Image (cartoon, grey):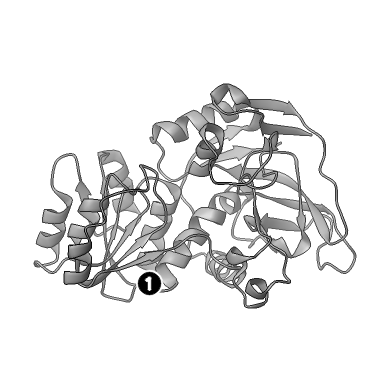
């Protein structure tokens, strides 16, 4: 099969070419991948990969949509069935899996990080990791929906769900998770303020329901948030940027509010500002991929036509280097998708 393979660190360490077809042990199914979507972890794996247990060479990619080509007879999957891949291969037997918290599986292997991923013609995973695609979504939309919207779903509806009428700030709107958070927070009935340095991204966010937009190159985010909230600050701030925005994030959230952290693309070691945290009684929650129940809830809402991912651009598999370059520049609005014919 053809695949995007990380053979060594750096841009010249990615090869697009032939790679062995995956095997199908008992309990696994094989998907013919038709579309995949990029995530920032692709760049991290390419350039660093520190802290993630893995071996090279490795096929990159976290999201996939396509159809089943081979599965056990009792798996519930049949050849030709359109499916999406849950982004983590989980055991289904440990205490966390049995409790329905698959992201904490003791034997978890994340696609494109700890095992071969989705930028290839074929993907082999445990059969319980594949979920039918709603008829309302095509393959590109399904691939774009997967990890970004599942991550956003958990932070919007998870440990500390946003409630109707609350003000939520989405930091750095433009990428897939941030746009998904905007969409889902609006579905939850929140008033949503978004930030970006790009007027184009802010205009796109307005089209998708943002109530207020802030260009942080031209104005102070905390000052403007306070103006827009009558001096109270936001009830919740969603930050996947990290170090570069942390100070603004803490100054934008109101007394008794909360910060949801889902990424740290600019670094993971900002000043803690502990005095502000305890004086204003701000709660900080970490959040990542949702569980299978949340995945199915997300797909149910998408299947009802209430949610469609924003797709920035589409590249063929042979142009994966160009797709990664666009992601690295940070120019995208929504998800970058790879077609795999």
Secondary structure found at label 1: loop
- Residue at 13% of width from left, 48% of height from top? 220
Q: Would residue 56 be found to the left or right of residue 26 on screen?
A: left
Quadrant position of the N terminus in the picture: top right
Single out the residue that lies furthest toward the right: 73
Number of numbered discs visible in the structure rendering? 1
Image coordinates of residue 244 in percent, x first then y, are 28, 44
Residue sitting at 39 percent across and 36 percent down? 330
Q: Is residue 15 above or below residue 24?
A: above
Q: Is residue 247 above or below residue 286?
A: above
Q: Position of residue 296 (x, y in %)?
A: 60, 69
In the figure, residue 22 lies in which quadrant? top right
Direction from residue 10 to residue 318 in the image, left or right: right
Give the farthest residue toward the top: 12
For the C terminus, give its image quadrant.
top right
Report x, y in % for residue 45: 56, 38
Q: Residues within 10 Å of mark 1 (few under 14, many from 20)?
A: some
Q: Is residue 147 above or below residue 187?
A: above
Quarter-of-image position of residue 105? bottom right
Q: Quadrant of residue 250?
A: bottom left
Name the residue that disc number 1 marks. Answer: 188
Residue 89 appears in view: yes
Asked whether residue 39 appears in the rendered view, the answer is: no
Q: Residue 223 in the image: x percent, y percent?
A: 11, 55
Left or right: 195 as drawn, with respect to 10: left
Does residue 34 sit above or below 262 in this rendering? above
């Amino acid at each position: 099969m053809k695949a995007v393979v990380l053979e060594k660190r750096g841009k010249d360490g990615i090869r697009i070419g032939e790679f062995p077809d995956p095997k199908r042990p008992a309990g696994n199914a094989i998907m013919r991948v038709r579309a995949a979507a990029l995530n920032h972890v692709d760049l991290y794996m390419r350039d660093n990969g520190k802290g993630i247990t893995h071996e090279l060479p490795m096929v990159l990619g976290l999201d996939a949509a396509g159809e089943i080509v081979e599965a056990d007879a009792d798996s519930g999957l049949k050849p030709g069935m359109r499916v999406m891949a849950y982004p983590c291969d989980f055991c289904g037997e440990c205490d966390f899996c049995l409790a329905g918290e698959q992201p904490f599986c003791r034997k978890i292997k994340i696609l494109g990080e700890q095992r071969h991923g989705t930028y290839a013609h074929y993907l082999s995973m445990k059969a319980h990791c594949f979920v039918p695609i709603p008829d309302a979504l095509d393959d590109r939309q399904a691939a774009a929906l997967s990890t970004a919207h599942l991550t956003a779903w958990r932070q919007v509806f998870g440990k500390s769900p946003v409630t109707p009428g609350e003000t939520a700030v989405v930091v750095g709107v433009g990428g897939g998770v941030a746009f998904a958070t905007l969409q889902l927070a609006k579905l939850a009935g929140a008033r949503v303020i978004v930030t970006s340095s790009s007027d184009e991204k802010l205009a796109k966010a307005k089209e998708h329901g943002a109530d207020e937009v802030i260009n942080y190159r031209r104005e102070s985010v905390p000052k403007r948030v306070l103006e827009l909230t009558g001096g109270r600050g936001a009830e919740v701030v969603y930050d996947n940027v990290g170090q570069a925005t942390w100070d603004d994030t803490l100054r934008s959230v109101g007394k008794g509010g909360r910060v949801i952290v889902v990424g740290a693309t600019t670094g993971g070691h900002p000043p803690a500002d502990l005095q502000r945290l305890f004086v204003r009684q701000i709660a900080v929650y970490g959040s990542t991929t949702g569980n299978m129940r949340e995945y199915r809830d997300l797909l149910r809402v998408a299947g009802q036509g209430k949610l469609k991912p924003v797709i920035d651009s589409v590249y063929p598999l042979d142009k994966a280097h160009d797709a990664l370059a666009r992601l690295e520049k940070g120019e995208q609005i929504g998800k970058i998708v790879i077609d795999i014919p």
